[in-house]
Amino acid sequence: MIGAGTIINPIIKVVTTVAILGAVYLFFVKPALDTAEDISGDVGASVQRAQDEALARSEQIALDSLESRAESYGNSLRSSWPEASRAVRECSKDAKGGAEAMEKCVDLGSTITTQVQSNRNFARSYASSLQAQGRTADSAEVLRCVEQAGFKVGAMQRCRNLADRLLFG
């Protein structure tokens, strides 16, 4: 015989199992998942903050390095070529903490010290030799060329070539 007990017992078992599983989910699994989600969100935010801070420190270190290099070039030129030293230092002041602008100041200092200064020194020295030989006009021409060349590589090379030609023929 099929009675009410045979149909109702399995339904009660299924309902009871679903109710127990629902309660377990509601009271244990869901809070654990919410906590894990909160923790992972906090960790993600912390990692992002740490990355942002590391990037800012890295950029500041790079800027400090550029400022130091520009200052070094400016200081190395101070006694031998005060105008060039001033130009590099003013460039650094005008850069106002910008890495790209400061890089241009470093490039200016590097170009002056490695490419322009040597030709300038030779041209001025040759001008002194010309003056000592009594060739005042030739000496003045070389010095005028040096003055007009400023910090330009090609222009200063032309002054040295002029001085070479005038001194050595």
Image: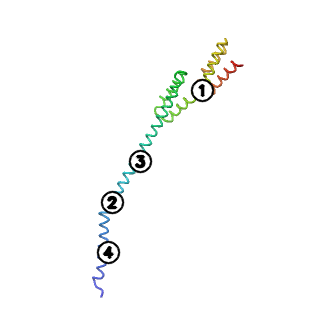
Please state which of the two labelled residues, at mark 4 or mark 1, is closer to the viewer: 1
Determine whether 30 is above or below 155 in the image: below
Query: Nearer the viewer's eye, disc 4 or disc 3?
Result: 3
Q: Which label belongs to residue 30?
A: none
Task: Name the residue at 57% across, 27% down.
Answer: 113
Q: Secondary structure at mark 3?
A: helix
Instruction: Quote the CA–CA distance across marks 3 and 1.
Output: 46 Å
- Circle 1 sits on which residue? 116
User: Which residue: 49% across, 35% down?
Assistant: 99
User: Which of the 4 image quarters holds residue 128?
Assistant: top right
Among numbered discs 4 and 3, the one appearing first in the sequence: 4
Residue 60: x percent and y percent?
45, 37
Q: How is the image coloured?
A: rainbow
In space, the residues marked 4 and 1 are separated at their CA atoms by 92 Å
Looking at the picture, how far across and down is residue 167, in whole percent?
68, 18
Figure disc tally: 4
Q: Nearer the viewer, residue 128 or 97?
A: 128
The residue that mark 3 highlights is: 48
Kindly report the distance in space between the C-alpha atoms of the residues bearing marks 4 and 2. Answer: 25 Å
Could you tell me the amino acid type at mark 1? Answer: Val
Identify the residue position indicated by label 4 in the image: 14
Q: How far apart are the alpha carbons under marks 4 and 3? A: 47 Å
**Is tag 4's residue or tag 1's residue first in the polypeptide sequence?**
4
Mark 3 or 1, closer to the camera:
1
Q: Which mark is residue 32?
A: 2
Q: Which one is earlier in the sequence, the residue at label 3 or at label 1?
A: 3
